[in-house]
Image (cartoon, rainbow, N blue to C red):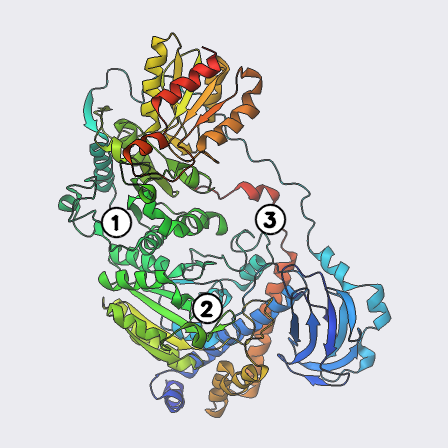
Amino acid sequence: MATEILMPALSPTMEEGTLAKWLVKEGDTVAAGDILAEIETDKATMEFEAVEEGTIGKILVDEGSEGVKVNTPIAVLLEEGETAADAPSAGAATEAPRADAGNEEAPKRAAEAPAPPTPAQPAAAKPEPDWPEGTPLKSMTVREALREAMAEEMRRDDTVFLMGEEVGEYQGAYKISQGLLDEFGARRVVDTPISEIGFTGLGVGAAWGGLRPIVEFMTFNFSMQGIDHIINSAAKTLYMSGGQLPCPIVFRGANGAAARVAAQHSQCFAAWYSHIPGLKVAMPYSASDAKGLLKSAIRDNNPVVFLENEILYGRSFDVPDIDDFTVPFGKARIWREGSDVTIVSFGIGMTYALEAAEKLAEMGIEAEVIDLRTIRPMDTATVIASVQKTNRLVTVEEGFPQNSVGSHLASVVMREAFDWLDAPIITLAGKDVPMPYAANLEKLALVTTDEVVAAARQITYR
Amino acid sequence: MATRKTSAKAADSSTGKANVSAEDMKTWYRQMLLIRRFEEKAGQLYGMGLIGGFCHLYIGQEAVVVGMEAAAKEGDKHITSYRDHGHMLVAGMDPKGVMAELTGREGGYSKGKGGSMHMFSREKHFYGGHGIVGAQVPLGAGLAFADRYKGNDNVTFTYFGDGAANQGQVYEAYNMANLWNLPVVFVIENNQYAMGTSTKRSSKSPNLWERGAAYGIKGEMVDGMDVLAVKAAAEKAVAACRAGDGPYILEAMTYRYRGHSMSDPAKYRTREEVQKMREERDAIERVRELLLTGKHASEDDLKAIDKDIKAVVNEAADFARESPEPDVAELWTDVYA
């Protein structure tokens, strides 16, 4: 059967083009791959090849024609034994341009995107701990809590393994993995070369291959070398595969400013990673949250970015002394109840938030202090419920101010609780400068307890 | 068995190494032809506006993936770049599902959400389809890491091009792969052009496989237009990996007839260069001639194969046009597991 050769789309955006030159004439025999014509697009002149063999029966669009719409028949190709008479007439072709037929073929696009599914509204958190009353507690450092979480999960599940720089024989750059090599051996505690993009990608591949890798970055500053694999490979593939390929992996390590390590080693990645659909992001403050959230992260079937803090590693907190203690993602913790102002923070920012609350109490201002614990998913319900009570909000974090976690939270609260707000929301963050080295400047660059106190007083007008 | 003997002879005269049967050669002929016809059809559908975005055709390179995968067994894993349609077809994925993904429809392997460059099949151990040049190399090493960790004898086939060979992450992956003896065959499909930049203009040392020597990885170059030669080299590489003596690098010298993507004006090479490769080196023609001159198949036999393939491809194209666009609710699914 004679087939029409249609004006091709030669780029993702081409709608029409110029038929610059015919390189064949009526009656010519062509083979697949032969160049039929030169076509000018908005970007370049391109050669247009035959995809099937046959004889050019008719040329329907003369060379030099401009504005030829994609899918317009430009020639007729005859099969063996056919003559030009078998070709559909040019007139008919013009009357019924295939361009439209082509469009009709594609199902109509939905005019508007549907609304996202509303998850069952999580109940706002209550100011109670994550364990039953009367549970025996033990004091341990954040460092010990993280180690215990990994060891427990590695005992429970053979597919869990730890990889990273100095995690094994060196016993961990920050001693988080101390002792794990002795207990689990080199098969499961894998020292890597200094190859962040390589081992980040390798970890993602291992997760697809059925393992549950914990990838330690010595600090999250170095994760930028491997960020392509965290975002493009780990976070997006479940979606791109239509749900076939989950990526159960934890990227963990020290995040944010330590002390006197200057600009390249002092940066908070909470806002960066929480921007990405497909990732989960946790940033614990206390030892119990560090343990409970890390165990949940390792069991999660999604990629989790787990942001720790070097300064918090050595701090001690009460941790429930029970088997298999976990903390769910997406549930904030209310550390302190109050009626005058809500202070929301996470990670080391909680230090300033809690200190400020003590000082404010001395001034007669009762602050409610909320620890988000996970940045994605974010428990905005608990924050909104609190703002509906206090009518005021201060957010506290060490990251940079533009597009911070606090600025996102402020937009959510403004939208969801506008009528309850009695004052502008204040989003406190690190200063908008690279981290300086000098001790006095470094202190100024970070958010301080005094700034939290001042912000709370400013919006409570006291 | 008699057929097997005579055909082995025919193959010997071609490459001097591969021990193959006429049936094998017919299978490869069929697979290569399926890729070519499928890609030609994809090009057509692209021209009609039914396929959007970027679309990278594999035409010309068919012998590489067909020869490599002839050495694979069930359980082996496969990962490649965005020029991935051929790899999926040889991995045994349904042409209908692949084509419907190209048209962005519900019946596609990723329900229309991945497109030409991002397609996967867990069932067929095909791990993509990756749009970031070179990313698949450490990812492939990681798949092999998982198999070594579990202690099975699976091998991961990790394909990348001469362009990706200049990404730093390739060499990080090489080092770790050999440090940990990972069962991975790195297949460099050297089609001589990274988009529009020839290897001469991008790589100081012309033999890309030799770079593995810096990491102590064995490797060799193979004629990627000769499916028998590729298969022979693949068997050697895969055997080394299965025996715990991996990784291995194969550099297959090949050529793509079409542009880098559909919107490639191809001004970086001459028409004559392309034509010469098509006429003198075509991998499908080579096998076709072997089959005919060795009297393992008649013209009619091959015509029947052509007809079958055409039907399969047309069926795939029909399915890809008729399958509906994904339900709008799909916008919000598969973000989290």
Along the viewing direction, whichever of A41 and B189 lies nearer the viewer: A41
For residue B326, the mark is 3
- On the image, the x and y values in percent for residue A345 come to 39, 26
Camera-near label (3 vs 1) is: 1
User: How far apart are the two marked residues, 2 and 3, measured between alpha carbons?
Assistant: 26 Å
Count residues near mark 2 (Cα–Cα under 10 Å), then give few for <14, some for 14-19, many for 20+.
many
Name which quarter of the figure residue A199 lies in: bottom left
Which residue lies under the disc numbered 2?
B90
- Which one is in front, A39 or A348? A348
Separation (CA) of disc 2 from disc 1: 36 Å
Q: Amino acid at mark 3?
A: Pro
* Circle nearer the viewer, 2 or 1: 1
Q: Residues within 10 Å of mark 3 (few under 14, many from 20)?
A: some
| Nearer to the camera, B237 or A353 | A353
Q: Position of residue A329 (x, y in %)?
A: 38, 32
Report the disc number at residue B96.
Answer: none
Residue B13: x %, y % from top left: 39, 91
Residue type, label 1? Gly
Looking at the rendered structure, the kind of residue marked 2 is Val
Chain letter for mark 1, please.
A
- Quarter of the figure that contains the C terminus of chain A: top left
Query: Quick check: do tags 2 and 3 share a chain?
Result: yes
Q: Are marks 2 and 1 on the same chain?
A: no
Where the N terminus of chain A falls, by quadrant?
bottom right
The answer as to whether the residues below labels 3 and 1 share one chain is no
- Within-10-Å neighbours for mark 1: few <14, some 14–19, many 20+: many
Q: Callout 3: residue from which chain? A: B
Residue A164 is labelled as 1
Q: Is residue B248 visible?
A: yes
Q: Nearer the viewer, residue B214 or B105?
A: B214
